[in-house]
Amino acid sequence: MEEETRPSEETAGASGGHPKPMLTVGQQIAHMKAKGITFGLVSEEEAARHLRAKCQFFRIYAYRKLFEKRIGGERDGQYIGLDFGHLKVLSNLDRKLRDALLPMALDLEHFAKVRLLAAAEDNGEDGYAVMRDYMASVTDRQRSHLEGELDRREDDPYAGDVVRKYRGDMPLWAFCEVVSFGAFLGVLRFCADRWGNAELSDLHYHLKWVKSIRNASAHGSCAVNDLSERPSRRWRAPDAVTRALASCGVPKRLRAKRLRSPRMAQMCTLLYLYDRTVPEGTVRTDRERALADLFGYLHGEGACLPSENPAVSSLTFAERLTRGLGLID
C-alpha cells in the first residue's frame, strides 16, 4: 500500500514535541483497525485511495463520534459496529446536506433583502434617510466596524464599484448588497423597529438562527458528526418551529429531544423559514430537488447505517419537517 503523510487523529501539528505525530495513509488505516473499525463494506485498498484523493483522514474520522465504544474487556475503547464504509457514507451525507442548505440560506438572504426594500417603499422611505438614521443609532464601536467593513470592500472586484460610488451617502439598497450577512441583519432589525413591522421582526429573529448554519456550510464544516442533544438554555428553538413540527405530527417528547441540539434547531429553523419566505418558482424547485436527493441518499446508500445512529435519526427527524412543510413529497 502506497503511503503518504497525512494529519494525525486530532491535530495537524508538525514534528517535534507535539504528542500527535503525522500519520501516513497506511498508519491511518492501522490506527482505525486498532480502534475496532472494520473494512468489510470498503476494502483497505479502496479506503487508502479514498484517503489519498477524496477525503482527508482528519475529516472522515470525525464521524466515528456517532458510534458507541466498548467499555471494559479486551476490546475496551474500540468502536462498536463501525466500518470504514459507514464513515464514507456519513461524509457523503454531510456533503449533500451542505449542498442543500447553503443555497437555501443564500436564497433566504436574497429574499429577505427583497422584502426589506418592499417594506421601505411601503413606508415612503427614499433609502437615504433610513440609512443616515441607522448609522446615527449604532454605537461608536458598531459604526467603526461597519466603516471598516466598507473600507475593505472598496477594492473588492465585485462590490468595490458600488461602495466607491455611494461611499459618502449610501442608500439602503446599496448597503444591503455590499455588506456581510451580519451587517444586513442589523439594519433589518432597525427597520423592523422603525416601521413597527412584526413580519420583518420575525424574519430578523429567525435569520439569526440561519446565520451560523449558513457560515458553517460555506466553510465546508462537518455538520452530522455532532447532532447530540446537549441541553442548554442558549438553544431554545423558536416557538414557531416547534409549532410547525407539532403540526407535522411530531410528538412533544421527540421535539424536545431533537431540538436540544443547536445544529438541529438551526436546520429546522432554516427549513421552516424557507417555506415561509421563498416564493414558488425555479429557485425553490431546485432546492426541493436537492433536499429530495439528500433524503434519497439517506434511505438508499445510507441504509447500511444503523437506524439508531444519531445522524440517521436526526436527519429522519428533519425529513419529517421537510415533508410536513411540503418541500418534498
Image (cartoon, rainbow, N blue to C red):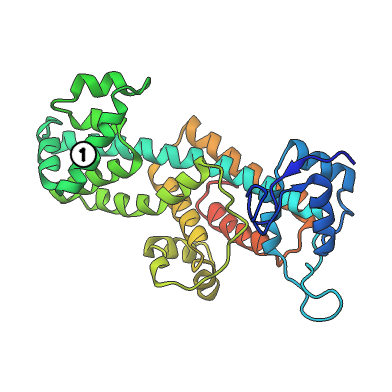
> Is residue 262 visible from the viewing direction of this image?
yes
Is residue 325 shown above or below 144? Answer: below
Can residue 118 be seen in the rendering of this structure? Answer: no
Report which quarter residue 243 is drawn in.
Answer: bottom left
Q: Is residue 280 above or below residue 197?
A: above
Count every numbered label the image shows and give the total. Answer: 1
At numbered mark 1, what does the secondary structure look like: helix, strand or loop?
helix
Q: Position of residue 9 (x, y in %)?
A: 69, 55
Q: Nearer the viewer, residue 174 or 118?
A: 174
Q: Position of residue 108 (x, y in %)?
A: 40, 41
Residue 149 appears left or right of 134: right
Left or right, 137 with respect to 88, comes to left
Q: Tell me the residue that label 1 is attached to.
A: 119
Residue farthest along the front direction in this orientation: 16
Task: Decide if residue 152 is on the left or right side of residue 246.
Answer: left
Position of the N terminus, as image quadrant, is top right
Q: Is residue 304 above or below residue 144?
A: below
As shown in the figure, which amino acid type bears the numbered disc 1? Ala
* Of the pair 179 and 18, the residue shown nearer to us: 18
Looking at the image, residue 105 sits to the left or right of residue 72; the answer is left
Residue 275 position, x and y percent, is 44, 47
Q: Measured from the top left, where is residue 183 in percent x and y? A: 28, 42
Q: Residue at x 49, y 69 (%)?
A: 260
Q: Residue at x 67, y 63 (%)?
A: 65
Q: Residues within 10 Å of mark 1 (few under 14, many from 20)?
A: some
**On the image, which quarter does residue 304 sit in?**
bottom right
Query: Between 149 and 185, which is closer to the camera in this rendering?
Result: 149
